Amino acid sequence: MSGTEFNFVPDAKWQQMELLKKINKTNSNLSKSLFTVFYRNYLVWLKYYKPGIIGDILEPLLYLAALGFGIGKFIHNINGISYIKYIVPGIIASSSMYAAAFESTFGAYTRMVTNGIYQAILLTPIGIEDIVSGEILWGTAKAFMSGTAVLIIGTVFGWIISPAAIIIPVVIVLNGILFSSLSLLITSFSPSYDFFSYYFTIAISTMFLFSGVFYPVSSLPYAIRYFVYIMPLYYTVSIMRMLDEGKINPVLLFSYLSVIILFALIFFYASVYFIKKRVIK
Amino acid sequence: MKKYILEINGLIKNFNRLRVLNDVHFKIKHGDFFGLIGPNGAGKSTLLKILYGIVIPDSGNISINGLDLLSNYKKIKYSLGIVPQEDNLDEDLSVNDNLIVYSKYFGITGGESRRRASELLNFFDMGEKKYSKVSELSGGLKRRLMIARALINNPSLIILDEPTSGLDPEYRQNIWEKLKALNRNGVTILMSTHYMEEAERLFKNIIILNHGNIVFNGAISEITLNKKSLEEIFLDIAKH
């Protein structure tokens, strides 16, 4: 078949009830729509995954090795646990935070502004809510890859303490949703790639250094500790450490989970609102 | 089936304090090849962007296939094929994957998706470019791919915003042929252009917009009855 012989027939049944019912059913199925956005990102990732894996998986392992063996030589234990074992939950949380943050800032900005992918998708029945949900799902998948890689290495080398750590992947998913949502919110305001320097320096690096990844937050002066309590990473690090050490306090666990879910919901709805405001005039 | 595929009444859009569209009314019949003409800044692109949901109007009613656009935009998109002015093909994907991924947004999957992609690439004489990167395509081929992409869901109405802008005459003629063939097959087309030759060759009915107002609405044969070419009429309008 070639040229004008193409037998294109527009969908004449469009107005018929059966098709409308099908459309209604499809529209109500958010999961299907968000997976199509996820699928597009996955397809592109397959083409360039090798350098991505270095950043998402190898880098946290380098941190773990350098700090765990290097500084661990001078710190015999924290709360009765060797230093390398102590920092494993923190490295899992921070590596998943970084993976989600990079994907949902630089990656999402490229799709939204540089390549106009959101604008192309919006010409179809996919809406902003589907795009944002698909992006968050994708950022969470990247976070999951990074966090679970550290968890697996930690388990293989015997740095994981309690069997309760088997629940940590669930917390990695929550952490991924949280930081993908927050990062998309930042992206919705960003006028350029350079703007992300503010986010990574002021928010992400600060959380990485102060949320209890490398030392107990109780060792910080009181004034600084209050700032730590507004940092979302503090709560995921605390839960992961609780699970890793098998010292689960149900009240704290429930409260910290509630804080993470609350943060994630706020950032999700805010990112939908502000991305809509940016893309639709 | 309703007589009109698209009905617009009292459409108004302001950007800040500037009125871009002022009380726009018109209707398009099923099977029409309908043109939207006007000088730069007349409001053509804004009108089309409202139809494909990137710009929200301040007031007015729009119905497509009998459904109100603003309250049913997701449903309506299933019956629309849209070719915006800006190239927003997915540069990270191959030509074929652009169509496959796009079809998934309409819920078209598997063998059906591959069949449609293959048919459309053949129709647009791009079969041998199937696995090429989008970045390797010329401007004309990118335009053809954008039109092919807009047809992946078998739309009953195609909206094209200056699809031949910036193309050389050979590519433009090629796109005209494809659009005429689609229209002969029953696809309703709404297209904007600032090439008067293109308007005279393709459109059955037109509206002419100037400063957001419709200054002509009718058959293209009517406007050329007074022995003036469309280009002369267009230039007269643009002066005001």
Image (tube, coloured by chain):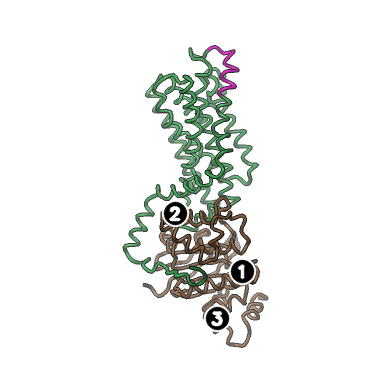
Please report the residue visible at 48 percent of the width from the left and 42 percent of the height from the top.
Answer: A138
**Chain the render paints brown:** B
Q: Main secondary structure of the magenta part?
A: helix
Q: Colour of chain A?
A: green
**Closest to the observer: A213 or A91?**
A91
Few, some or many residues within 10 Å of mark 3 (<14, 14–19, 20+): many
Q: CA distance from mark 3 to mark 1?
A: 24 Å
Please report the residue visible at 61 percent of the width from the left and 54 percent of the height from the top.
Answer: B135
- Please state the horizontal and vertical placement of residue B234, each as a whole percent of the image: 63, 77
Residue B104's disc number: 2
The residue carrying mark 3 is: B220
Along the polypeptide, which appears first: circle 3 or circle 1? 1
Along the polypeptide, which appears first: circle 2 or circle 1? 2
What is the span of residues highlighted in magenta in the rendered image? A64-76
Magenta segment: does it hold A69? Answer: yes
Give amino acid for label 2.
Lys
